[in-house]
């Protein structure tokens, strides 16, 4: 029987496979820019389950599936039986008999694990409270396109030890770069995710020290989806953690800035950083499209 490949975290890809997906993403980007049609997914469907809001993830998967010749279904938990308590395992069994691939954006990472266990088709993590691996495919594609291989480089993560930070930790393991993680005390990444990567990651409390000499500076919102009520308390806890032009000036001379978006100018990032030519956030957002097309090709091969 053919083994089903899921993409729940970056650790589901070997380093070679990760690099392969990035390379293929750039090829697909070139093909699209040249107007070359590539529609291998004729007759195939992607179910996209969203339990949280999205702009980029929804549009990139839906447009990507269309460009590959397939069809995408947007399923909100509000309008499906999932939102009325149908068990995850049952939903997985049913949906995976009808579609060829599933993407889920949800809260607890356990939900997507249960879904994948009972799914007869590949399942892609479109963000959970713990991880956002699709974003890292796009971030790494963006780095490779601007600067070449990331092996041996230093990335500074400034902000919350959240789902994006966890996926950066996994990327550091897979692509062999150094990660300086700078969070206020109490907002560190989970030890179970950090500990296996401890050789490549270092925790800082001083953002300027974490940014010093870094090749890439990355941040994300201070209050993630599901933490809206903590917004005010988090703004206080993260004071001093805004990525500023002073911080960029102590990084490597050609350092890039990334943010998965949506961004809050004046909170986690200063406007003159995100709107500066060293900021590659628009390429990063666009690359969600190409990277996920490459990922779906890989999983359905
Ligand atoms: N970066 C990202 O995942 O954006 P959306 O929440 O808009 O999908
Ligand atoms: N950490 C953010 C990422 C949004 C794409 C969140 O989970 O809301």
Image (tube, grey):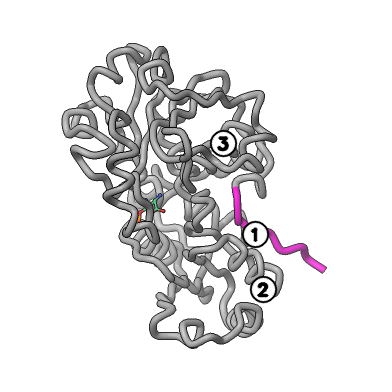
The answer to whether 282 is drawn above or below residue 134 in the figure is above
- Disc 1 under 8 Å from ligand 1? The reply is no
Q: Distance of mark 1 from mark 2, alpha carbons?
A: 10 Å
Q: Which mark is residue 115?
A: none
The residue sitting at 70% across, 74% down in the picture is 118
The magenta stretch spans residue 26: no
Question: Which callout, 3 or 1, points to the residue nearer the camera?
Answer: 3
> Residue 200, percent across and down?
61, 25
Name the foreground residue: 252 vs 141. Answer: 252
Residue at the spot of label 2: 119
**Upstream in the sequence, badge 3 or badge 1?**
1
Start and end of the magenta stretch? 1-9
Residue found at the very far right of the displayed protein = 1
Q: Which residue is mark 1?
A: 6
Query: Please, is residue 64 above or below residue 263 in the view?
Result: below
- Mark 1, Cα crowd under 10 Å, few <14 / some 14-19 / many 20+, is many
Quadrant of the frame with the C terminus: bottom right
Q: Find the distance from the CA under tag 3 to the CA under tag 1.
A: 19 Å
Residue that badge 3 annotates: 169
Q: Quadrant of residue 60?
A: bottom left
Is tag 1's residue or tag 2's residue first in the polypeptide sequence?
1
- Residues at discs 1 and 2 in contact (Cβ within 8 Å): yes
């Amino acid at each position: 029987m053919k083994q089903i490949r899921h993409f729940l975290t970056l650790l589901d890809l070997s380093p070679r496979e990760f690099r392969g997906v990035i390379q293929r993403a750039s090829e697909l980007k070139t093909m699209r820019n040249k107007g070359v049609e590539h529609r291998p997914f004729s007759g195939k469907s992607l179910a996209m389950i969203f339990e949280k809001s999205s702009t980029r993830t929804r549009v990139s998967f839906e447009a990507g599936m269309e460009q590959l010749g397939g069809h995408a279904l947007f399923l909100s938990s509000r309008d499906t039986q999932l939102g009325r308590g149908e068990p995850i395992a049952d939903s997985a069994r049913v949906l995976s008999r009808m579609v060829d691939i599933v993407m889920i954006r949800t809260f607890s990472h356990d939900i997507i694990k249960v879904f994948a266990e009972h799914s007869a088709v590949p399942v892609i993590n479109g963000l959970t409270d713990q991880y956002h691996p699709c974003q890292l495919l796009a971030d790494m594609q963006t780095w490779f396109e601007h600067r070449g291989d990331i092996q041996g480089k230093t990335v500074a993560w400034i902000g919350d030890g959240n789902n994006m930070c966890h996926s950066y930790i996994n990327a550091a393991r897979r692509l062999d770069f150094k990660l300086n993680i700078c969070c206020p005390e109490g907002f560190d990444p989970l030890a179970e995710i950090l500990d296996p990567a401890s050789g490549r990651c270092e925790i800082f409390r001083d953002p300027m020290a974490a940014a010093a000499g870094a090749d890439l500076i990355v941040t994300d919102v201070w209050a993630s989806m599901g933490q809206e009520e903590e917004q005010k308390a988090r703004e206080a806890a993260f004071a001093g953690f805004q990525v500023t032009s002073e911080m960029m000036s102590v990084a490597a001379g050609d350092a890039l800035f990334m943010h998965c978006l949506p961004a809050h100018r004046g909170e986690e990032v200063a406007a003159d950083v995100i709107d500066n030519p060293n900021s590659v956030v628009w390429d990063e957002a666009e690359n969600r499209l190409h990277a996920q097309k490459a990922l779906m090709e890989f999983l359905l091969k």
